[in-house]
Image (tube, rainbow, N blue to C red):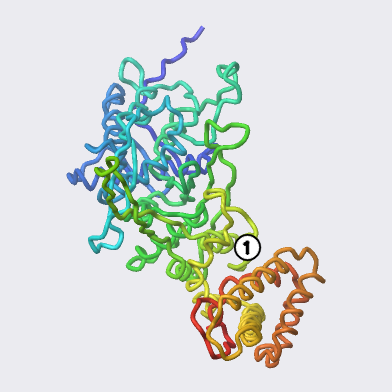
Amino acid sequence: MAKVAKVSPPDHLTMHLFAPGMSLMHRAGLGGLACTLRAMEAEFPDGNYPWEVQPHAITLRFGKPENARDYLKRLFEFAFRINAEGLITLPGQYEREPSAAVLADLQAGFLLTFLQHGRVRTLAKETIPVSYDPEGDGQPGVIVQYRKCSYFTHQNGWEEFVERTGEMTRKPLPFKGPICPGAVVRHEKFAADTIVKYPPDMVLPLYFALVGSLPLPVNRGVAALLVPEVENLQDFAYDRPSMTPSTARDCQIGNAADAALQAQIRIRSRHAAKSLAVPGCYAMTFQPTTWSKQQKSRVATIHVPPASDRVLDRFERALTNLPNRIVTRTVRESTGRGAQKQVTERQESFRSNSVIRPVVAENLALGRPWYAGFTKLMTKINPATDKPYRDQLPFERKGLHAMISDPKMWDEEGDRLVVEAVHDAIGRRLGQIRAETDGDKPLSQATKNRWERFRERLRLELAGAKTEAHVRFALTDLFSRAGNNVVLREHWAKVLPVIRKDWQLARDLGLLALASYSGRGDTDESDSKTSTNGQ
């Protein structure tokens, strides 16, 4: 009987981007490994590297089989660091380490996705404040809170890839949540029999998915995870640092689509000097669920394709006109009692996210008109504040009006004309109310009250419309009561088909016009001129 030849331990490890079984997360992880190796080349520019990064494969060369332990240990120690301030730093994600405020936000994203379980990271109990000045004018800075990290599971991940002899293992390795968010054992009682295992060349890339992807916090309990589509490892290693926000303001996102399009814009700006396609990505949302409140589960995923210049140009306008706000408030604090009581005041700033731009981003990412579904902003409750979204719309009215006034934001002229017609009607109706109530007298509180009731009644009529007939009645009733409408008189043939074709779209346009109206009744100031275009 012939003896079975003993297979020599491997002296290298080759991982292929499109090998069978390589999922989206595997490919993003292999891209993250390429980014890490590129960062190592920049830090140690001696030109003789024991690895090779090809467009579709990476080869790690150990020299001798028993050198695998030291090789992987050095690789992981470089890739997964904690700086002196107790913040996780990943050199593969950026060309130079960002500020502490940015790292604190990035760490919050890690803790809501990859490192959400307490067993896979060690955090201090107390929180550390980091202040940054978003305007650069020396005013009180915005405070970002974080807890110092002293360990996370990726740091010693190299241990499971090597044997006691220091050689690379050939055994299948477990596929677990900390290296692939959303991958969980269905039941702990049967973990040994149901856990998924992969060969080492498919598990190693998953550790570097922490580098290749981009997790960002939406708020304390919700995070967005961007997993880019990696098609060329060399190009991705060039693109990936641009995805990471460079300022704390850029870390503010409203939802996953908002984060994805912001990342694509940052990559496009880098490509100004090099012609490359902006990669697409999958934008995932992680948040607690009613059936598992102790962890953040993946509850939604949308594919954001390689965006066209038209889509990115429109989103860039939305980013300019609907920015996240820095709100400053006065906080009063008292010390002592009675005659010894002293009251001091201090300025405190915090970040307030746009509520309109996330809707715009999701619509653009899914190929819909940017104003589709605007109705929900006029009817729904914001889960982050437990208050209606519409309460925050006045803060963004000016930016919203700038967007609808920009011809490049519209594909269909009829849609734009519907908004202009509603603006005209609102302005004229408010003028009628003013004349009926005050005549030639100064603006009174009674007029303001009637203006407010008129706007609320119009909102309820449109938002509550559930049929084509109801929407048509709400709009035509507004037009008829407002009197002579310049837009309708000149463009009725273009406005009417929009109202007849898609009643839900017409409802969105009507509410968009109401939210963006800027003219008579927008402020408490008197306006003696009739507005025909919302200005």
Q: Position of residue 182 (x, y in %)?
A: 54, 35
Q: Position of residue 447 (x, y in %)?
A: 60, 78
Q: Position of residue 356 (x, y in %)?
A: 53, 63
- Dot 1 corresponds to which residue? 378
Task: Tell me: 217 left or right of 194.
Answer: left
Q: How many marks?
A: 1
- Quadrant for residue 160, please give it: top left
Task: Tell me: 428 left or right of 499.
Answer: left
In the image as oriented, which residue stretches furthest toward the front?
A: 339
Q: Amino acid at mark 1?
A: Met
Above or below: residue 109 compared with residue 328: above
SS at circle 1? helix
Q: Residues within 10 Å of mark 1 (few under 14, many from 20)?
A: many
The residue lying toward the viewer, choosing from 57 and 499, is 499
Please tell me which residue is depicted at 36% across the width and 18% down the height of the picture. Answer: 163
Above or below: residue 311 compared with residue 417: above
Q: Is residue 98 visible?
A: no
- Quadrant for residue 425, please give it: bottom right
The residue lying toward the viewer, choosing from 183 and 50, is 183
In the image as oriented, which residue stretches furthest toward the top?
A: 1
Please tell me which residue is depicted at 60% across the width and 64% down the height of the picture. Answer: 367
Above or below: residue 271 compared with residue 525: above
